Amino acid sequence: MWRVFGIREGVVFANELMIYNRVFESDSACVVELISNLHELGPLGQLINEIVQLGGSPHWDRFQFIYRVGNQVAHCLEKLAIDHNICDTWKKAMP
Protein backbone atom coordinates (compact mmCIF):
# COMPACT_ATOMS: atom_id res chain seq x y z
CA MET A 1 0.00 0.00 0.00
CA TRP A 2 2.87 2.42 0.73
CA ARG A 3 4.01 2.08 -2.88
CA VAL A 4 0.64 3.37 -4.05
CA PHE A 5 1.02 6.35 -1.71
CA GLY A 6 4.51 6.91 -3.12
CA ILE A 7 3.20 7.05 -6.68
CA ARG A 8 0.43 9.41 -5.56
CA GLU A 9 3.01 11.73 -3.99
CA GLY A 10 5.05 11.60 -7.20
CA VAL A 11 2.03 12.65 -9.26
CA VAL A 12 1.24 15.48 -6.82
CA PHE A 13 4.88 16.62 -6.92
CA ALA A 14 4.96 16.59 -10.74
CA ASN A 15 1.74 18.63 -10.75
CA GLU A 16 3.29 21.19 -8.38
CA LEU A 17 6.28 21.53 -10.71
CA MET A 18 3.92 21.70 -13.72
CA ILE A 19 5.65 18.78 -15.44
CA TYR A 20 3.57 17.16 -18.17
CA ASN A 21 4.03 14.18 -20.51
CA ARG A 22 5.57 12.27 -17.63
CA VAL A 23 6.56 8.69 -16.99
CA PHE A 24 6.15 7.24 -13.51
CA GLU A 25 8.13 4.08 -12.82
CA SER A 26 7.66 1.55 -10.06
CA ASP A 27 9.28 -1.76 -9.28
CA SER A 28 5.89 -3.00 -8.10
CA ALA A 29 4.29 -4.71 -11.09
CA CYS A 30 0.99 -5.18 -9.25
CA VAL A 31 0.68 -1.44 -8.50
CA VAL A 32 1.43 -0.52 -12.12
CA GLU A 33 -1.14 -3.11 -13.21
CA LEU A 34 -3.78 -1.65 -10.86
CA ILE A 35 -3.24 1.88 -12.17
CA SER A 36 -3.23 0.75 -15.81
CA ASN A 37 -6.35 -1.46 -15.55
CA LEU A 38 -8.98 0.55 -13.75
CA HIS A 39 -11.62 -2.15 -14.12
CA GLU A 40 -9.81 -4.31 -11.51
CA LEU A 41 -9.26 -1.85 -8.68
CA GLY A 42 -9.60 -4.08 -5.64
CA PRO A 43 -9.23 -2.69 -2.09
CA LEU A 44 -7.03 0.24 -3.20
CA GLY A 45 -9.63 1.50 -5.67
CA GLN A 46 -10.23 4.91 -4.12
CA LEU A 47 -6.51 5.71 -3.97
CA ILE A 48 -5.91 4.44 -7.52
CA ASN A 49 -8.79 6.58 -8.81
CA GLU A 50 -7.28 9.58 -7.05
CA ILE A 51 -3.92 8.97 -8.77
CA VAL A 52 -5.61 8.79 -12.17
CA GLN A 53 -7.66 11.95 -11.49
CA LEU A 54 -4.58 13.83 -10.30
CA GLY A 55 -2.92 12.91 -13.57
CA GLY A 56 -5.58 14.77 -15.48
CA SER A 57 -5.14 13.17 -18.89
CA PRO A 58 -4.02 9.68 -19.90
CA HIS A 59 -1.94 11.39 -22.58
CA TRP A 60 0.13 13.16 -19.90
CA ASP A 61 1.03 10.22 -17.73
CA ARG A 62 2.44 6.78 -18.32
CA PHE A 63 2.90 4.31 -15.48
CA GLN A 64 5.36 1.55 -16.15
CA PHE A 65 7.10 -1.28 -14.37
CA ILE A 66 10.87 -1.13 -13.94
CA TYR A 67 13.00 -3.84 -12.37
CA ARG A 68 14.53 -2.88 -9.03
CA VAL A 69 18.01 -2.96 -10.58
CA GLY A 70 16.97 -0.10 -12.86
CA ASN A 71 15.61 1.89 -9.94
CA GLN A 72 18.68 1.99 -7.68
CA VAL A 73 18.77 5.77 -7.14
CA ALA A 74 15.20 5.76 -5.85
CA HIS A 75 15.97 2.90 -3.47
CA CYS A 76 19.12 4.61 -2.15
CA LEU A 77 17.15 7.80 -1.46
CA GLU A 78 14.37 5.81 0.17
CA LYS A 79 16.85 3.98 2.42
CA LEU A 80 18.57 7.25 3.34
CA ALA A 81 15.22 8.80 4.30
CA ILE A 82 14.13 5.78 6.35
CA ASP A 83 17.48 5.27 8.11
CA HIS A 84 17.74 8.92 9.14
CA ASN A 85 14.02 9.63 9.64
CA ILE A 86 14.11 12.28 6.91
CA CYS A 87 10.89 13.65 5.45
CA ASP A 88 12.10 16.10 2.83
CA THR A 89 11.81 16.96 -0.84
CA TRP A 90 14.90 17.71 -2.86
CA LYS A 91 14.10 20.03 -5.74
CA LYS A 92 17.31 21.88 -6.53
CA ALA A 93 19.88 20.54 -4.08
CA MET A 94 21.16 16.99 -3.97
CA PRO A 95 20.69 15.06 -0.69
Image (cartoon, rainbow, N blue to C red):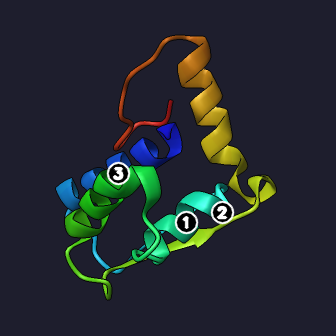
In the rendered image, residue 55, in percent from the top left (x then y), is placed at: 26, 69
Mark closest to the chain's N terminus, 3 or 2: 3
Identify the amino acid type marked 2. Ala
Q: Residue at x 20, y 74 (%)?
A: 56
- Say which residue appears at 41% left-offset and 51% top-offset: 44
Quarter occupied by residue 64? bottom right
Three-letter code, disc 1: Val
User: In the rendered image, which quarter is residue 48 located in?
Assistant: bottom left
The crowding category of the residue bearing disc 3, from other C-alpha atoms within 10 Å (few below 14, some 14 to 19, many at least 20), is some
| Residue pointed to by mark 3 | 8
Would you say 55 lies left or right of 73 here?
left
In the displayed structure, 65 sits above or below 84; it is below
Q: Residue shown at 47%/77% (left/top)? A: 37
CB of mark 1 within 8 Å of CB of mark 2? Answer: yes
Q: CA distance from mark 1 to mark 3?
A: 12 Å
Instruction: Provide the secondary structure element on which disc 2 rests.
Output: helix
Residue type of the residue flagged with mark 3? Arg
Find the residue positioned furthest to the bottom: 59
Marks 1/2: CA distance? 5 Å
- Residue 78 found in image quarter: top right
Rendered position, 89 above or below 7: above
At label 1, counting other C-alpha atoms closer than 10 Å, the crowd grade (few under 14, some 14-19, many 20 or more) is many
Let me know if residue 7 appears in the view: no
**Residue 82 badge:** none
